[in-house]
Image (cartoon, rainbow, N blue to C red):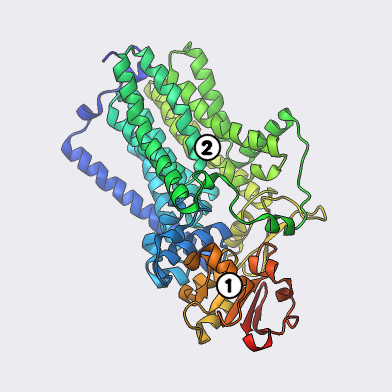
Amino acid sequence: MTSVALPRAAQRMPRLAQARTIAEGRRERIEQSVLFLVAWLAYFAVGYRYVVQHHVLTVDATSRYAHAFFIWHNDPPKLAAVGFIWAPISTLIFLPAAALRALSTSLVGMPLTTAAFGAGLIVVLYRGLRVVQMPKLQALTLVLAFGANPMIVYYAVNGMSEVPYLFFLTVAMVQFMLWFLSREPKHLIVCGIMISLGLLTRYEVLLWGFLLVPVLTVAMIRQRVSRDYLEGTLIAFLAPIAYGLGMWIFLNWLIQGNPFYWLTPQTGSKQTEAAAPPISNAVHWDAVETLRHVVDVYWQLFPPTLLVFAALLLGFVLRRGRDMMMLTLAAILAVNVGFIWALTFKTHLPGFTQLRYNMRDMPLTLVAMSWLYLAVGGRWRRHALWLACLVSIVATYPTTWHAMKTFRYQFLEQAFTRSLAQDRDQEGTRSLGWSLGVDEYGKAAHYDVGVGAAQRMGDYVTRVEAPRSSILTDDAQTFWVMLLCGCPQRFFDRIDYGDARWLDAVATPWGRVRYILVTDHYDDQLALHWPALRTPGKLKWAHLVRREPGYLLYRVDARER
């Protein structure tokens, strides 16, 4: 192979196989294992204290964990409980922890799982920096500074899918960088596998997969490879992605009857949409103003991304277009900006600028920093660049913290910062932000923080003598109770019986179930079918036995219907 397409810095880089001895490789694996364990324990300790004990628990994370719990503990257990609302791996990652009932009912399994992916992300970034010959101490300092960013910490411990899919995406980008340096096919195959796993965790990851196809093509054309080699390389990269996406499409077709069910709204029906509370949320930003708002979120959340993006473009120009990887990394950072801009501009919903949607470029910024470190060359220039990167990351802490406390569109970040600052339970408090924006009165919407009501209702369900499948409920709304009580087999829900049979039981519950558990949520299908359930005493056959904020448990009496 020729090196005509490689930048000079890459040409000077020694081959990886020649740079390491067996002993050095073993020592590095031990060091990375220790780094992983330390980071995992640190993240888990934060998650247990400030998420589990302080009840800063998100709806999405708990729903995914609950479905993983149902896979093991429903009666009968079934893998179909993973559902089709979320990308499957975002639920499947919880299977090991959800197998243990004690980890599930205490909600400890959520931070335990995502903390492992947070630690994995730290290790992957460390390996990426070591690949470009950054000294161990400098690389370790840089990744630990990044890992301590409050936004990274929060999503590494709260059970959400952000850090798991960022782990897969970052591995993919590091492997792509390794392929660009060495042109070894194994790196490209691993890159494709990671893109596949990433898109099955969050569908947006496919955007980066699409971006890499033309980059691969141009890079190999510049290298003057044969047509057969070019086709074989593209197939090696695309095959894992096509397989993962094809498998998910097939399962959607097989089970739901629609191969693209995963692309459709799945949280309710027209009846649900009609019952939704009025939301005054639309904005009328033009294209330029929309872009300004999106970039402003980046500047508030993690300014180094914008600085590194500018440095990549400048470096590409100064090198007169010879360093294609700089332009590629700039495009990799720009993908999410363009995606968020397009969604916000098309829908006029500013909720798409939510903080968690704009953290995708944070680890990718470190990948780009590693290439800049390799490209600048020279000992002192590299030291200066490393110092600039470290200072920019550490200086971001106050900016990120302020955004998490005050930004309008967020996902309990404010409650987490308050939990850290006050070191006390956040049960019963409110947290700024909701992806829908504002309520019907034009005021900023809030989350109610805590799970106390669901825990008390779950404790009551545990005490009451309820046989298998005797409590009719909409599991999409009451999964908190089903998880916290640890007895999902007592509930008659759609996961066990399917929509058709469940809807039939909703229409005629007499003699089929002993209890009905309903919520005050606008999209609770039980409450939509029987609106009188929201007001105890209006239905002769439904007798209230337990009431908690947001939850009503009725005993069904077939004799008084």
Question: From the viewer's perspective, is residue 45 above or below residue 34?
Answer: below
Residue 223 falls in which quadrant of the image?
top left
Instruction: Residue lying at the far left in this picture: please name it.
Output: 22
Q: Secondary structure at mark 1?
A: helix
Question: From the viewer's perspective, is residue 283 above or below residue 401?
Answer: above
Q: Earlier in the sequence, mark 2 or mark 1?
A: 2
Residue flagged by tag 1: what amino acid is it? Answer: Ala
Question: From the viewer's perspective, is residue 279 above or below residue 283?
Answer: below
Q: Report the front residue among 248 and 188.
A: 248
Residue 417 falls in which quadrant of the image?
bottom right
Q: Please indicate, yes or no, whether residue 524 appears anywhere in the rendered image.
A: yes
Label 2, on which residue? 361
Q: Residues within 10 Å of mark 2 (few under 14, many from 20)?
A: many
Q: Residues within 10 Å of mark 1 (few under 14, many from 20)?
A: some
Residue 115 falls in which quadrant of the image?
bottom left
Q: Is residue 326 left or right of residue 334?
A: left
In which quadrant will I find the C terminus? bottom right
Q: Is residue 149 left or right of residue 560?
A: left
Residue flagged by tag 2: what amino acid is it? Answer: Asp
Q: Report the front residue among 490 and 405.
A: 490
Residue at the spot 31% in from the left edge and 51% down from the top edge:
34
In the image, which is nearer the foreground, mark 2 or mark 1? Answer: 1
Q: Position of residue 197 (x, y in %)?
A: 40, 43
Q: Report the front residue among 339 and 498.
A: 498
Label 1, on which residue? 505
Q: Position of residue 272 (x, y in %)?
A: 68, 58
